[in-house]
Image: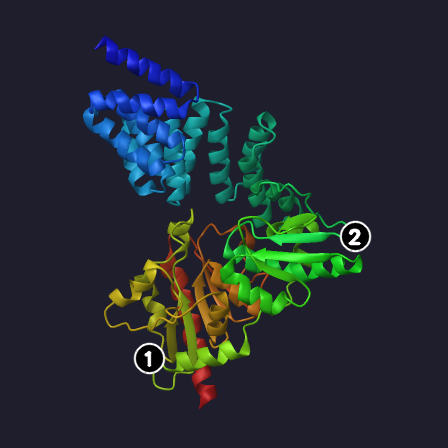
Amino acid sequence: MATLLDALNAAVNHHMAGHADAAADAYRRILAADPAQPDTLHLSGVLRAQTGHAAAAVRWIARAVRVRPAAPAPWGHLGAALRAAEMPERAEPVLRRALALDPADGDALEAQGASLHALARYPDARRWLERAARLRPGHAATLLNLGTVLRDQRRFDEAEACFDAVLARQPSRADAHLARAVGRLVRGDLRAGWEGFEHRWQRFATPPWAGQPPGAATILLHMDQGFGDAIQFVRYAPLVAQIAAAGGGRVILETHMLLYRLFNRDLGSSIQVLSRGEDPPPHDIHCPLMSLPRAFGTGLPDIPATVPYLAPDPGDVARWRDRLDGLDGPGEDGAALRVGLVWAGNPQHRNDRNRSIPAAALLPLLMVPGVRFVSLQTGEAAAGLDRLPGVTVPNAMERVRDFADTAAILANLDLLVTVDTAIAHLAGAMGVPCWLMLPHVPDWRWLLDRADSPWYPSLRLFRQPRPGDWTTTLGTAAAVLRAQAARAVRTAR
């Protein structure tokens, strides 16, 4: 027993010193001798959580909880690991148990607030985080989480006070700068927001371009976020090319292969478009696409919103017209409107549970007469409509190769109805009519309360009146679609 205790103490010393590999090896040797040793199971899970392996941490700490269910710390760490693994529904009852065992566990209080925040239970999240903040005043992570909840409740002054308190102690803390920036951007204070937003990316070896005359330099523009972000901000690339050309410089745009054909067609005459490789191409200065609004000093009145700035190849449009004409979808014979549907985004997105819509909630839309629907949904969610009785909506995405093909499909639609994912940006960039279904707390770029977007004139925004209420949102959209379809049928006659 003394030997096992000594081994555990040595493992903990490695762990506390930050020697993760040595600690993991030591824990492994202990468990080989005693597979049910609870402290080792618990700490092995904690180590995995600390090294970014949340799912593995859940498995190890759950074993510790089964062995010693009355110990509060493993319950708290299990809940925190479930939250980190993007499983807040499972985390909430686990953390409730942890706090029943130890009401003063600050980490569990904070994790409970963060879990409820992820579930869009904002008042409850705020109460737990305020308890955590009273228990340990000045704790950076707690203040950051509390500020984020307050921001999403539109208590912006209180949120900024939390973020400012964190930054007063840790001036270079990137997540606090970003959280404060998002609060400014969503209120339309773009110029202030862009500054803090710069903390989202790692610097290149080459100097950043911030709008200054580049002379004869080669400027590299590159993706630093998702597909939708690239589509939204590539509108600035021709403006950069104009500035570069004036001084004899040139612009290279490095993008994902799925965007290459689309971008190369519209930008290739003045900009060299490349598919992203392991290393960036030779260049003198660089700028992430999402930093271009800052470089141009963009405020709400000066957003370059002329559309279309992206367009599909006419040959692709004709091919997809023939394919769509061959699909059989619901709707009356001679339905006047062809409407595309996308109801779910990337399931790996941190806010996907709030921004995506259950397929069954689309029924009010699908019952509107005079409409021929087509699914543009990708991934596992695409099968959602197939499970609805009496619903037959063809999916057009099976033969799609890239965003250029998706653009060709959009060019053949009268309307796209979608959640907040990349295809909304593509429709907006093309000037295709698009209805965007937004959760109660929207992404910053959609601002607050308004039904239009200064970024995309062809978008109409339908917002949840309260967290989780897709019924009202889709009911409103269905009523508007019913009126629009009736007008289109009358016109067609």
Q: Residues within 10 Å of mark 2 (few under 14, many from 20)?
A: some
Q: Secondary structure at mark 1?
A: loop
Residue 211, compared with residue 69, is above or below; it is: below
Residue 33 shows which numbered tag? none
Residue with the mark numbered 1: 328
Asked whether the beta carbons under mark 1 and mark 2 sit within 8 Å of each other, the answer is: no
Seen in the image, is 98 located left or right of residue 397? Answer: left
Residue with the mark numbered 2: 215
Location of residue 443 in the rendering, given as x and y in whole percent from the top left corner: 50, 51
Location of residue 116 in the rendering, given as x and y in whole percent from the top left corner: 37, 40
Q: What residue lies at 44% left-to-right and 67% top-to-bottom? A: 401
Residue 467: tell me if it is visible.
no
Label 1 is placed on what type of residue? Asp
Q: Where's the C terminus, which quadrant?
A: bottom left
Location of residue 245 in the rendering, given as x and y in whole percent from the top left corner: 76, 60
Seen in the image, is 260 located left or right of residue 296? Answer: left
Judged from this view, the residue extending furthest toward the top is 2
Residue 74: tell me if it is visible.
yes
- Counting residues from the start of the chain, the first of labels 1 and 2 encountered is 2
